C-alpha cells in the first residue's frame, strides 16, 4: 500500500516537464488524484481503529485464527468447541490469544460477552441452549488446562472460603485479609451462632479451593483473636508451604439459595422399573453449587444413597435436577448433604453455569 502511494515520487519532476506530450494541467490532476487516494486510505485506517467492535486491538492488531488454533492444538477440544473459541475471541476483538488463554480473568471477560451475544442473537431457544452448552463446555476445558502456581497464603484472594480441620471438627470460614502480618479469617461459629474458642497456638490444617477449582492445603497455627470493623476475627500464621491437592472437575460457587427437595424412589423391577417423585417437599438451602452437584443444608437427617429432586429459581427461571446423596455431615441440628447431579436438562445446566461463572450478572 505504501509503495503504491509513493510511486509517483520516484519519478524526477524534471523528466515530466521534459516530456512535451505531458501538460502542466495533467501533472496537477495526477497529483490531486494521488493525494485523494492517500487521504482516503488514511481515513479508512483511522475509522477502522475507532469503530466499536472492530477486530483490531489497541495496537491495531488483527485477530489470528491460525495463531489461536496453533495454541490450542494440544487441548482436548473437539471441532465444535474450537469453532466456538474462535467465535468468542473474534467477538471480543482478541489480538493476543496467548495472553487471554493464560489469564482466567480475561477468559471470563471474553466468554461473558460472547454469552450475551448468543442470548441476543440466537434463532431459537433450542439453538441458544445448544450454543451456550458448547460455550460452557469449552470454558470448563480451558479452566482445567490452566495450572495454578500458589506457594504462599499471601497470594490467596480475600473472601476465599476455607475449611479448617481441628481434630474431628471441620469449620467453614472465609478469608477477610491476607495483606497483614497474620492471615485474618472469620471467627468460627457453631450452628447457634456462638463463637468457637480455639486456644492460641493450636495447630490447624486448612483446605481451600481457588476460583479455578484448584485444591490446596497448608498447615498453620492460631496466633490470636481480634476484632475488625466491629466483628470478631481469628488470626492464623502465614504459610509459604502450600501443597497442591487436586482439581475439581467443575467450577463451584458458594451460595445461599433457597431450594425444595422431593425424595425420589424406585418403583417396580427390571424393565418396568421407574422413578417416582414423592409429593412431600422439604425446604433447604444450597450452600455451594457446580454443574456437577451441590452441597445442601437441611434440618432433616438424610441417608447416603438417597435420590432427591432439587428445585430452585435462578434468574426467575425454575431449575431442576435429580441428585444422588454421596455423603452427609451432621453438625448440631443441621445436616449438610453432598449431592451429585445424575440427571439435569441442558437448559438447567446452562443456568447453573451462568450463575457459577457469573456471566448472567454483568
Image: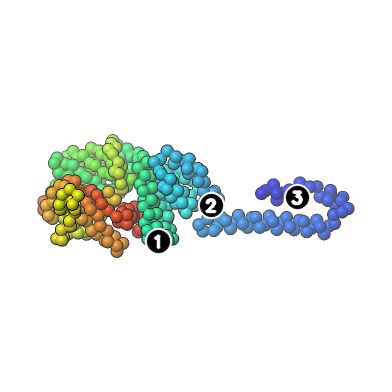
Q: Residue at x 42, y 57 (%)?
A: 118
Looking at this view, name the residue that lies furthest to the right: 20
What sort of colour scheme is used for the picture? rainbow
Residue picked out by circle 3 = 8
Q: Label 3: state its secondary structure.
A: helix
Q: Can residue 180 be seen? A: no
Pick out the residue farthest to the bottom.
Answer: 316
Residue 172 location (% of width, % of height):
20, 48
Circle 2 crowding by C-alpha within 10 Å: few under 14, some 14–19, many from 20: many
Query: Pointer 1: residues within 10 angstroms few (<14), some, or many (20+)?
Result: few
Q: What is the spatial separation of the Cα atoms under label 3 and label 2, in whole angstroms? A: 30 Å
Image quarter in which the C terminus is found: bottom left
Position of residue 147 relative to residue 262, above or below, is above
Q: Secondary structure at mark 2?
A: loop
Q: Secondary structure at mark 1?
A: loop
Please name the residue shown 54% across and 48% down the image.
Answer: 61
Q: Give residue 89's position: percent from left, percent from top.
A: 46, 50
Q: Which mark is residue 56?
A: 2
Q: Residues within 10 Å of mark 3 (few under 14, many from 20)?
A: few
Judge left or right: residue 210 versus residue 278: right
Question: Residue 258 in the image: x percent, y percent?
Answer: 22, 59
In terms of sequence position, does the residue under pointer 2 or pointer 1 come before the other? 2
Residue 258 sits above or below residue 76 on the image = below
Residue toward you, 60 or 70:
70
Residue 242 position by quadrant: top left
Q: Pointer 1: what residue?
A: 124
Amino acid at each position: 500500500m505504501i509503495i503504491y502511494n509513493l510511486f509517483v515520487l520516484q519519478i524526477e519532476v524534471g523528466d515530466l516537464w521534459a516530456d512535451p506530450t505531458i501538460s502542466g494541467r495533467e501533472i496537477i490532476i495526477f497529483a490531486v488524484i494521488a493525494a485523494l487516494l492517500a487521504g482516503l486510505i488514511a481515513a479508512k485506517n483511522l475509522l477502522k481503529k475507532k469503530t466499536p467492535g472492530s477486530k483490531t486491538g489497541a495496537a491495531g492488531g488483527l485477530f489470528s485464527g491460525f495463531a489461536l488454533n496453533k495454541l490450542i492444538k494440544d487441548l482436548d477440544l473437539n471441532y465444535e468447541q474450537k469453532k466456538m473459541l474462535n467465535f468468542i475471541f473474534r467477538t471480543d476483538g482478541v489480538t493476543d490469544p496467548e495472553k487471554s488463554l493464560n489469564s482466567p480473568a480475561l477468559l471470563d471477560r471474553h466468554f461473558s460477552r460472547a454469552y450475551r451475544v448468543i442470548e441476543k442473537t440466537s434463532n431459537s431457544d433450542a439453538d441458544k441452549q445448544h450454543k451456550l452448552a458448547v460455550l460452557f463446555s469449552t470454558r470448563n476445558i480451558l479452566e482445567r488446562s490452566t495450572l495454578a502456581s500458589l506457594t504462599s497464603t499471601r497470594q490467596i484472594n480475600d473472601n476465599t472460603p476455607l475449611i479448617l480441620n481441628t481434630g474431628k471438627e471441620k469449620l467453614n470460614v472465609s478469608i477477610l485479609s491476607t495483606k497483614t502480618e497474620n492471615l485474618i479469617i472469620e471467627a468460627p461459629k457453631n450452628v447457634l451462632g456462638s463463637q468457637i474458642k480455639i486456644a492460641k497456638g493450636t495447630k490447624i490444617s486448612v483446605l481451600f479451593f481457588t476460583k479455578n477449582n484448584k485444591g490446596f492445603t497448608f498447615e498453620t497455627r492460631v496466633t490470636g483473636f481480634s476484632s475488625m470493623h466491629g466483628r470478631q476475627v481469628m488470626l492464623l500464621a502465614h504459610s509459604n508451604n502450600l501443597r497442591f491437592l487436586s482439581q475439581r472437575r467443575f467450577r463451584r460457587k458458594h451460595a445461599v439459595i433457597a431450594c425444595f427437595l422431593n425424595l425420589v424412589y424406585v418403583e417396580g423391577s427390571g424393565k418396568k422399573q421407574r422413578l417416582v417423585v414423592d409429593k412431600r417437599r422439604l425446604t433447604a438451602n444450597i450452600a455451594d453449587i457446580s454443574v456437577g452437584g451441590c452441597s445442601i443444608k437441611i434440618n432433616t437427617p438424610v441417608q447416603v444413597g438417597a435420590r432427591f429432586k432439587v428445585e430452585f429459581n435462578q434468574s426467575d427461571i425454575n431449575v431442576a435436577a435429580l441428585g444422588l446423596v454421596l455423603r452427609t455431615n451432621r453438625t448440631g441440628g443441621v445436616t449438610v448433604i453432598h449431592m451429585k447431579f445424575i440427571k439435569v436438562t441442558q437448559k438447567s445446566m446452562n443456568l447453573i453455569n451462568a450463575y457459577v461463572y457469573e456471566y448472567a450478572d454483568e
